[in-house]
Amino acid sequence: MKLVIAKSTEELGAVSAKHAAALVNEAIKEKGFARILLSTGASQFPFFKEFVKENIDWSKVEMFHLDEYVGISAEHPASFNKYLRERFVDVVKPGKYHLINGQKDPEAQIAELTALLSESPVDVGLIGIGENAHIAFNDPPADFDDKRAYKIVTLADRCLQQQIGEGWFKTKEECYKQAISMTCSKIMECKHIISVVPYKVKAEAIYNTFASEKSVMVPATLMKEHADCTVYCDPDSASMLTEDLKKKYC
């Protein structure tokens, strides 16, 4: 796992987007298409702002995404389906995209997505890290051994609080309590992983990720075992890191 600390949140968005674009273009050059996996949430705004501007033949890109709330309408302000349509799909018009519909049968969608994912590896995975260090909606204690592609999960309290803090819901009662989430093991199958993690609210998760050995209580530590994973932080999210950790991972 490599750590890059940008000078600002804006720079973080720009450099992570250029890195992702280079990997996507590399895949297109090698095999004629690229498969990408996208995450959502407020922390990904700086990345998407820049990523959609990159010089990519989007017609050759196939997109998957990490998770969606069970039962949510695709027009709900907190829907990740809506998030990706507005910030990515409708902007760049990728050749193929597979959005999870929260109101359709979860098991049927899992089966469909699993079949699609089995066709070819994902080239670039954009994997956020939550305030409790979750990856996708794999809250601690995460299951690192589940070999399914997606599963239905019940969200932890810290995760629900994050959604409220980001403004997606006003109260815990409004929150959707379950989601379809990609599993940890499937995330690790991405050829390249880029993790964009800005803001002060992520400082504890970033510290725990880099300071801890692999632990189901800090799910993001699993990505340390990936062959090509780069975590992008801004000064705020990196504020708790010691100089020794920076020296080790930068």
Image (cartoon, helix red, strand yellow):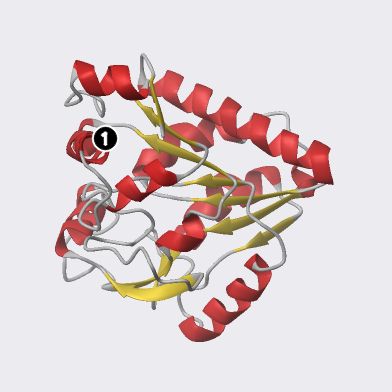
Query: In this image, 51 relative to 210: left or right?
Result: right
Along the viewing direction, whichever of 24 and 49 lies nearer the viewer:
24
The N terminus is located in which quarter?
Answer: top left
Q: Which amino acid, by three-letter code, is at mark 1?
A: Phe
Residue drawn at point x = 51 percent, y = 41 percent: 227
Along the viewing direction, whichever of 53 and 217 lies nearer the viewer:
217
Residue under label 1: 210
Is residue 243 visible in the rendered structure shown here? yes
Q: Position of residue 8 (x, y in %)?
A: 36, 17
Q: Residues within 10 Å of mark 1 (few under 14, many from 20)?
A: many
Does residue 213 lie above or below 110 as drawn? above
The C terminus is located in which quarter?
Answer: top left
User: Residue 7 lies in what quarter of the image?
Assistant: top left
Is residue 105 visible in the rendered structure shown here? no
Query: In this image, 67 relative to 166: left or right?
Result: right
Query: In this image, 187 relative to 240: left or right?
Result: right
Residue drawn at point x = 22 percent, y = 19 percent: 244
Label 1 element class: helix
User: Residue 174 lies in what quarter of the image?
Assistant: bottom left
Q: Position of residue 175 (x, y in %)?
A: 24, 67
Q: Position of residue 161 (x, y in %)?
A: 17, 56
Along the viewing direction, whichever of 44 and 172 lies nearer the viewer:
44
The number of callouts visible is: 1
User: Residue 209 lies in what quarter of the image?
Assistant: top left
Query: In this image, 217 relative to 80: left or right?
Result: left
